[in-house]
Image: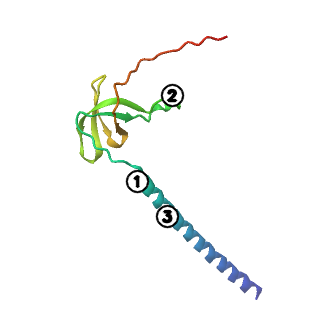
Amino acid sequence: MDWINASNNRLLEMNMMEEFRAQAYENVKLYKEKTKRWHDKKILPRQFELGQQVLSFNSMLKLFPSKLKSHWSGPFEIMHVYPHGAVEVKDGEIGFNFKVNGQRLKHYWGAPILYDKHSIAFRTT
């Protein structure tokens, strides 16, 4: 009789584990849906037009890691807007055209970027 009680307890524990696992899957699904809604709400639609100036996100700056280095390069001029978000831009310095995903671009509203490097000499006392 003792083995019957043990087997019943084991079946009960297995059922409880299965319910716990199903509940965990449901919680993960709800969390992912909530996170996706929050992320999608933060995405702003951008409309690009010919002749506009944009900045391009440069993710290849891992060679020179620096907290103060900008991840945005440019400005570039928009030459053609393709359907489904692709954009052809022209580099003003070298005159090279290339396609880029529109999600990697943002509007450039400022004055021309100066690439002059200045150094400041400090005196030691």
Are circles 1 and 3 on residues that touch, CB within 8 Å? no
- Where residue 53 sits in the image (x, y, percent)? 29, 32
User: On screen, 17 above or below 73?
Assistant: below
Say left or right for 37 vs 19.
Answer: left
At 44% from the left edge and 36% from the top edge, which residue is drawn? 59
- Where residue 76 sits in the image (x, y, percent)? 31, 30
Residue farthest to the right, as pictured: 2
Q: Quadrant of the C terminus?
A: top right
Task: Name the residue nearer the viewer: 97 or 40.
Answer: 40
At 64% from the left edge and 11% from the top edge, which residue is drawn? 124
Q: How many other residues sit within 10 Å of disc 2, few (<14), some (14-19) or many (≥20)?
A: few
- Where residue 37 sits in the image (x, y, percent)? 43, 57
Q: How many other residues sit within 10 Å of disc 3, few (<14), some (14-19) or many (≥20)?
A: few
Per the image, the residue denoted by label 1 is 41
Residue 108: quarter of image: top left
At 53% from the left edge and 14% from the top edge, which residue is drawn? 120
Say left or right for 23 vs 109.
Answer: right
At 47% from the left edge and 56% from the top edge, which residue is drawn? 35
Circle on res. 30: 3
Circle on res. 64: 2
Q: Amino acid at mark 1?
A: Lys
Q: Quadrant of the N terminus?
A: bottom right
Per the image, label 2 sits on a secondary structure element best described as: loop
- Where residue 112 sits in the image (x, y, percent)? 34, 24
Residue 82: quarter of image: top left
Q: How many other residues sit within 10 Å of disc 1, few (<14), some (14-19) or many (≥20)?
A: few
Per the image, label 3 sits on a secondary structure element best described as: helix
Circle on res. 17: none
Q: Amino acid at mark 3?
A: Leu
